[in-house]
Image (spheres, grey):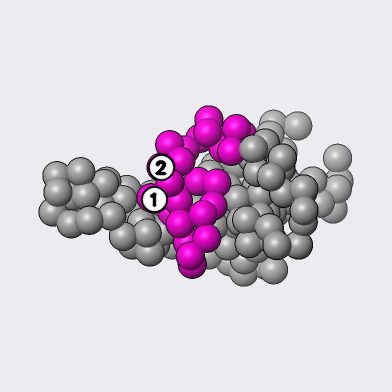
Amino acid sequence: MNLQVFEFKKYLMISLIPLLLLTIWISAIFSTFLQPLSKSFYLTSLFFMKIFSSVCHQDPEKSVLMGKHIFVCARCAGIYTGGFIVSLMLLCGMAIKTRKMKLLLISSVIIISDVLLYNAGFYKYYNLLSFFTGLFFGISVYLVFISEISIFINKRRRDE
């Protein structure tokens, strides 16, 4: 396989396909903001509630952003939004130079601390705080995930 074909396939695997999937996922999560535009939204919302129930606890009190109920909690919405933002940045050709594993460790400590402090009763649940801890975690997880996919693809290229 020549280098141009390889680079195109790598571009698809690292940039376009993840962005497409995340766009669909994020669109479904935030589709409640489009509810006034559709009279049949009730059936759609039941479908999305069922889909997202497998990845989030969907506590109604924790599933509010900007005054609207969404299909996942604020923390999960942040995680998916973080991945979406990074995938957009990568699609635009932005190189993200950082120590990905260190970033993942820091974001993990922050998100776990947020969960533990809330559950211990140190403060009440703040949707915006949870969204931003999830956002930071989602960014770092996605960076590590895409980095590992890139390493795997490059290794397969060398093996061919």
Q: Position of residue 129 (x, y in %)?
A: 33, 62
Q: Position of residue 160 (x, y in %)?
A: 75, 32
Residue closest to the eye, 31 or 10: 31
Disc number at residue 59?
A: 2
Crowding near pointer 1: few (<14 within 10 Å), some, many (20+)? many
Q: Are marks 2 and 1 in contact (CB under 8 Å)?
A: yes
Tag 2: amino acid? Asp
Give the structural element (helix, strand or loop) at label 1: helix
Does 52 appear above or below 35? above
Residue closest to the eye, 152 or 132: 132
Question: What residue lies at 53% left-to-right and 33% top-to-bottom?
Answer: 53
Q: Is residue 3 left or right of residue 149?
A: right
Q: Position of residue 95 (x, y in %)?
A: 58, 66
**Residue 88 visible in the current orientation:** yes
Q: Is residue 75 left or right of residue 90?
A: left
Q: Which residues are magenta?
A: 49-74
**Residue 151 visible in the current orientation:** no
Q: Is residue 68 magenta?
A: yes
Does 133 appear above or below 119? below
Give the structural element (helix, strand or loop) at label 2: loop
Which of the image's four quarters has the N terminus? top right
Q: What residue does disc 1 label?
A: 62
How far apart are the alpha carbons under marks 2 and 1?
Answer: 5 Å
Q: Is residue 107 left or right of residue 30?
A: left
Q: Is residue 99 magenta?
A: no
Question: What residue lies at 76% left-to-right and 62% top-to-bottom?
Answer: 37
Q: Residue furthest front?
A: 39
Question: What residue lies at 50% left-to-right and 46% top-to-bottom?
Answer: 72
Crowding near pointer 2: few (<14 within 10 Å), some, many (20+)? few
Residue closest to the eye, 4 or 132: 132
Q: Position of residue 3 (x, y in %)?
A: 81, 50
Q: Is residue 96 left or right of residue 90?
A: left
